[in-house]
Amino acid sequence: MPSDILSTADAVVAAINASGLLAPFPGALPAVRAYVPQYDLKDMGVLHVTVVPKGIVEAIESRSVVQYDHSVDVAVQKRGGVDLDPLLDLVVAIADAFRLKRLAAYPDAVWIRTEHLALFDPDHLANLHQFTSVLTLTFRVIR
């Protein structure tokens, strides 16, 4: 259900912003929900964390109950001659923050999986001098 996945994405944004994980990055913008994590290159000198609703998988749980698996992407992006290790540590810390937990702002959603298939985008790094990492978090809602 589209409104449920938006609730899931908004709850992920709220959890990231409440976690204090962005505090070590001077000038970091608060995490936001968007449909595309794309910004003007000139604005990428500060940390951007964007949560994007990605997809829904529905399956039967019982005769009258359906499980909805909501996947959201969390994009972490920053441009410039920066040390990449703290940015990668941030991505790992974001993943750790959701593992085995319910979303506080949307407790119907419980974490079931994290995917981080590529640690960073080598094309962004080589061509844009920008660190871009996308983490996919999946939460289950049963209705």
Image (cartoon, helix red, strand yellow):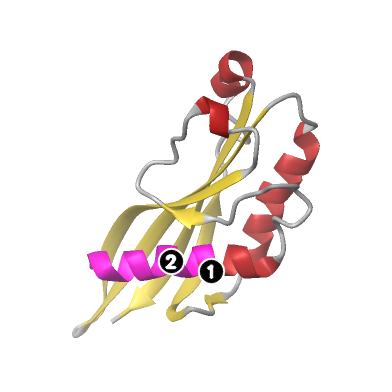
Compared to residue 131, the image places residue 107 above or below, namely: below
- Residue 116's image quarter? top right
Compared to residue 73, the image places residue 44 above or below, namely: above
110 relative to 3 in the view: left or right: right
State which region is magenta: 1-13
93 relative to 116 in the view: left or right: right
- Residue 14's mark? 1
Asked whether residue 99 is in view, the answer is no
Query: Which residue occupies the foreground of this view, 123 or 45?
Result: 45
Going by the numbered disc 1, the residue's amino acid type is Ala
Q: Main secondary structure of the magenta part?
A: helix
Compared to residue 70, the image places residue 85 above or below, namely: above
Please check the rendered image and state whether residue 4 is part of the magenta-colored stretch, yes or no: yes
Question: Given contact means CB atoms under 8 Å apart, are the residues at marks 1 and 2 in contact?
Answer: yes
Compared to residue 135, the image places residue 103 above or below, namely: below
4 relative to 101 in the view: left or right: left
Residue drawn at the location 62% of the way across and 15% of the way down: 126
Q: Where is residue 23 in the image (x, y as percent from the top left)?
A: 74, 57
Q: Position of residue 130 (x, y in %)?
A: 62, 26
Report the quarter where the N terminus lies. bottom left
- Residue 10's mark? 2
Going by the numbered disc 2, the residue's amino acid type is Asp
Residue drawn at the location 71% of the way across and 41% of the way down: 88
Distance from the alpha carbon under mark 1 to that under mark 2: 6 Å
Residue drawn at the location 44% of the way across and 35% of the way down: 38
Please check the rendered image and state whether residue 98 is part of the magenta-colored stretch, yes or no: no
Residue drawn at the location 31% of the way across and 73% of the way down: 67
